[in-house]
Image (tube, helix red, strand yellow):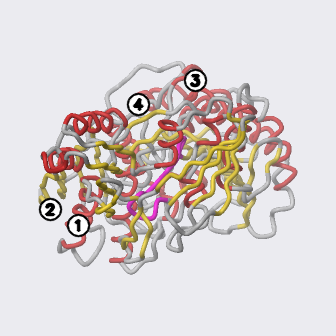
Amino acid sequence: MTVLLDVCFPNALDALVDRLSDPAWQGAQVEAWVFEDQPTRHAAEAALALAGVSARIRSAYKPLVHAVLEEMDLTGVTAMEIATPTHPAGSAKRFALEAYPLAGLVKMPVQFVSGSAALTYTVTLHSAEGARHFSVFAPNTVRPDATGQAQLSPSGWLRVARAGVRFEDRALPTEFVSAFDATMAAVMAHDWPAQWPFFETLEIRIDTTGIDWRLPFHDECLNTREALHEDLYFSLLEFFQTKAGLAPGDRTLQPGQIIPDIRRGEGATRVRVAVLPPVVEAVPEEARTVLETAKRPLRPGEIAAEMVAMGGEAFTVPSWQGRSILGRYFRGQRAGFLLSAGQHANETSGVVGALRAAQELTQMPEINFTLIAQENVDGYALHQRLIRDNPHHMHHAARYSALGDDIEARPAKPWYEKAAREHAFALCQARLHINLHGYPAHEWTRPMSGYLPRGFELWSIPKGFFLILRHHTGMGGQALPFLHALTEQVMATPGLREYNASQIAAWHAHAGALPFPVINGIPCMITESDRATVPFTLITEYPDETIYGDAFRLAHATQHATVMAAVRLYLDGRLG
């Protein structure tokens, strides 16, 4: 084990209260923006009031959403217009997306228009009595990211006045930013090997305060600890991509397994960064579960039990960390296909959907297919570990393999996880790959790197269940008719039509038009690509990172319905 960093940062709000509680500050008027939840901020305001200081302490993270929910009376309001900042260092849609999910929360027409370059939202509330106007400051600073590019990122802020005269108006250092910066500096300063993988496991353990506010719109929440996980994970990937001479977003990089483990703490923020060996635990035997009613991601032992009970011809492939990827071949005379899930291990509904569909498919005469219900077993083990403390986070650290790459993009031997897929294709002579995926069920942000997730901007907010159909060159003639027939059948899934309509409406309000067509209420994308082994790849995308209860049941019911409909159409010759 090598410890790169072990440090504590004092809580910025506690330090501010201590400073301003001095009698010399009596009579001051204070506005501050920090990365803390509402009860903590209100407690600080009360403490300062006892010291004779009038304070209003707001959220530096998603300030407009907090301002609307905490400070604006919407009684009788029939429409909302929001003029967003147009700062030259921010992307065009940055501040409209930062306002998400207001359009879904307020349940009234919300219109976004371009405002001034000042870092201020102007909110106009329309009612029968007329219009009311509010200004909401959005504290940001321009700072370099892991690749050296300047980014406009949320920041703590402090304004202090006395007798109406402001004499402090500046960025306020916070433990949130300090923890991020210190972690990045420690990793970037370390003497890494010349060749990758650079480590087995790079673990960042941070215990910190912050915001954890679940909102009454689908699975939406405001969570600074989750945002810190996401920003650290992808910023570190970008650093190692640059170090390896690759472009940001290159999915072939194999740095090792990066694990930001961000947990709720009290008081000072502790940051510990260490290089560790992996921990590979044996998969315990478990009983089978009732898949149709599953309300949570399955445990590895439950997946194994289902695969054994499925029958067929078993095959296994070892992962990078030595776990077994389980496959089954069901031999038949019909056109072959592969059904897989869990390429990205934090996308969990496809695992249940694949197993549910496979149970039915094995009862069909002469069916000829291979099944891999969980491709990325190392990532899945990490996801199971991370959801113990943060069950609802999206956990993109579990997205890729323990080598740190996307197994589909692995370009050369040793194949490890990718070998399972290629072996499955060969066994059944597949011409179709049904590849079940998911994506974040709530907003995905990277606050310290410009806010929007670079390279994944299309995935920053949910847009309901959608489909991607990839085909080899010259084989796209059947793609659109296939998707029309498929979406018509899938949309019969109870609850899906209403779910998709609600999420697409929120997308339109905050992000504008969808970049691809909506067919029977389901967004669809058709792409021509020869990178896949088989001629046709159908990819499902359900917002499932990480959901539970009835939301999870709808997710795997939709995955299951898609598989069954796609197989029927495929066997009828709709994809030749």
Q: Position of residue 257 (x, y in %)?
A: 31, 56
Going from the N terminus, do you reach mark 4 or mark 1 first? Answer: 1
Q: Which residue is mark 4?
A: 299
Q: Which residue is mark 1?
A: 187
Magenta residues span 440-451
Q: CA distance from mark 2 to mark 3?
A: 43 Å
Q: CA distance from mark 4 to mark 1?
A: 33 Å
Q: Which residue is mark 3?
A: 550
- 77 lies above or below 440: above
Q: CA distance from mark 2 to mark 4?
A: 33 Å
Please say whether residue 123 is visible from this viewpoint: yes
Circle 2: element type: strand
Circle 4: element type: loop
| Between marks 2 and 4 in the image, the one whose residue lies nearer the viewer | 2
Going from the N terminus, do you reach mark 1 or mark 2 first? Answer: 2
Q: Position of residue 278 (x, y in %)?
A: 23, 50
